[in-house]
Image (cartoon, coloured by chain):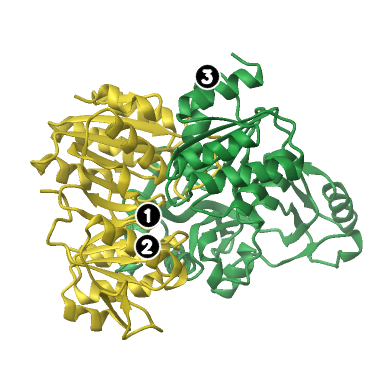
Chain colours: A yellow, B green
Amino acid sequence: MSVYVDKDTRVVVQGITGKQGSFHAGEMMAFGTNIVAGTSPTKAGTKFNDKVPVVSSLRDAMEFEPNATMISVAAPFVKDAAFEAIDAGIKIVYILTEHVPFHDSMEIYHNARRKGIVMLGPNGPGITAISSKCKIGIMPGKIFKKGNVAVASRSGTLTYEIVDAVTRSGRGESTVIGLGGDPVVGLSYIDVLQQFEKDPETEQIVLVGEIGGSNEELAAAYIKKHVTKKVVAYITGRSAPPGKRMGHAGAIIEKGVGTAESKIKAFNDAGVKVADYPINVPDFLE
Amino acid sequence: MGKEVFRRHGIPVPSGYVVEKESDIRKYEMPVVVKSQILLGGRGKSGGIKFAKSEQELTASVKQLLGSKIRDLAVTKVLVEEMIDIKKEMYVSIALDRTNKAPILICTSEGGVEIESVSHDKIFTRIIDPLLGYSQFIGRDAVNFMKLDPEVGKQFMAILEKLYKIFNTEDCELVEINPLVVTGSGKVIAADSKMVIDSDSLFRHREFEVIDPEKTPLELEANSKGYSFIELDGNIGVIANGAGLTMATLDALTLHNAKPRNFLDLGGTDNSETVSNSFEFVLKAKPKTILVNIFGGITKCDTVATGIALAKSRYGIKQPIVVRLSGIREEEGRKILKDAGIDSYPSMMEAVEGVVKATGGN
């Protein structure tokens, strides 16, 4: 068992012949992900990696019955690609692309939600379900080991750093989810906490947060009330000056909202241990 | 800039013109307001606004403001505007509410001051469903809450509808009118306004000039070359891959009582030239030491090592460089660095401790 995706997940890659799309589609297949089709406006009729049919539109790809999509097209075209996927009724819409206007993300999110579709990203590394051998996105496959620790994060590389630390400590992961570094993303910590709490494979949870917004504070309040499993957190951006976007569009302290102190305090108040350094996260796990 | 957009969308604004030098001053019906054109709120408090009842006063005000500085920003333009007969000042804004992933409308009949200083029970807030958009019921609720006269309320609602349209069509993070003024003759006018455009949307708004008054010249230079770069006030140059890991690196230094000089995120590059060129900006910031923290994935360790070795010889770097390499092609990378005489560590903590020691702190 894993959350959002499993061994029955059938993935279509929108933009499978682009530089990013083709590299990561190959890595995903090597991990075991079942990619059933890819789209490309120019290379329809060919096969990707001698195996995956490439078609010109998502409508054509529906013949292969995908139930998840990875969107890896340039930012100006993301909204259209996501609407195409929502219209086709694909249940998981993951957007890898960075620099998507947040107005577009807002529209995608609310349209997806009304249809019961899960939006993941934009600007996140995706989702990896280790025991289901399903990886959608760009996480390096080699850092994982099957285990009971679920991880949710707003970053990419920092997530890998922490997953690597968890794996090196002799533990392993169940499902790892990158929510995305933008101010508007599809999933919140609360959404994934609900899933992790229900997931029989997950026994403990790591939340990797950063400055900006109040997603972590809301998660802390939710944990206090609804989460029985052990939760450990790491928060980055303690040293960030206010008003500066620290690489991620969403990592900004605005009008005193979104500081690391406020997030660490909220987690501490909820009984969640917050590690000082990424490497210390496993110290607080069972 | 905000006013032109407002005018284009039919929101009433005061009439006026921009002055960059004394000879730009034209005759104008007195009295007038002379406003410094800077990209900051709160300029009234900082002395950036003057009033003139005669042409002599106008010339004197313009002379005084042009070339003055407000919070370290030089005033190069002033706006000469009709004086509005203010009977009442209100506030209205639409911004992104990150939690609800939707626009939030905020308004109060107590405008003219910073919204943060208005007591909460006087502020009307409403999350707007972006798929439904603005509809009159929202305006009616706001007008009732603010207890506006029917005539003022009607104008307020018309402005609100246009403001929401601006928020959407111009891809705004924020549109704000403060103050939204009711004049002596009962007209509602946007006396001052602010717009923040989402920089990721500029591909469809080529008409807007990108100006970020918060950025330093070195930041702008690095950004123009595609690097996510922020100057800080310490002495350790930092290069890492991924925004989260770069932030975590700064935090680790800070927890060791050391001070980073900058934030530089290489992103997902796997190009040695991109790595090497990034040193240009870090070196321009004149750090005492440099820390490179790489968790190799898409960015492979040997690519980074080649880039670092290249930068060392190309820029003749004298400062100690401490590198952490972990992940894909780590051993290959470590050998390249050793050959170039650069220390490297497998863990972030060892590298942080190494650079702190090399910097002479702690």
**In the displayed structure image, the side of residue B261 where residue B31 appears, left or right:** right
Q: Residue B60: x and y, percent?
A: 89, 50
Q: In this view of the protein, can residue B41 be seen by the observer?
A: no
> Residue A185 or A146: which is nearer the viewer?
A146
Q: Are marks 1 and 2 in contact (CB under 8 Å)?
A: yes
Q: Chain of mark 3?
A: B
Q: Is residue A88 above or below residue A117?
A: below
Query: What amino acid does circle 3 point to?
Result: His
Q: Residue A213: x and y, percent?
A: 39, 43
Q: Residue A69: x and y, percent?
A: 26, 67
Numbered badge on residue A107: none
Q: Chain of mark 1?
A: A
- Tag nearer the camera, 2 or 3: 3
Mark-to-mark CA distance, 3 and 1: 33 Å
Numbered badge on residue A184: 1
> Residue A232 or B239: which is nearer the viewer?
B239
Q: Chain of mark 2?
A: A
Report helix, strand or loop for mark 2.
helix
Q: Is residue A242 above or below residue B60?
A: above
Q: Are marks 2 and 3 in contact (CB under 8 Å)?
A: no
Query: What amino acid does circle 1 point to?
Result: Val
Residue in the picture at 48% in, 53% down: B268
- Mark 3: few, some, or many residues within 10 Å (few <14, many ≥20)? some
| Residue B341 falls in image quadrant | top right
Q: Residue B7: x and y, percent?
A: 60, 71
Pointer 3 residue: B256
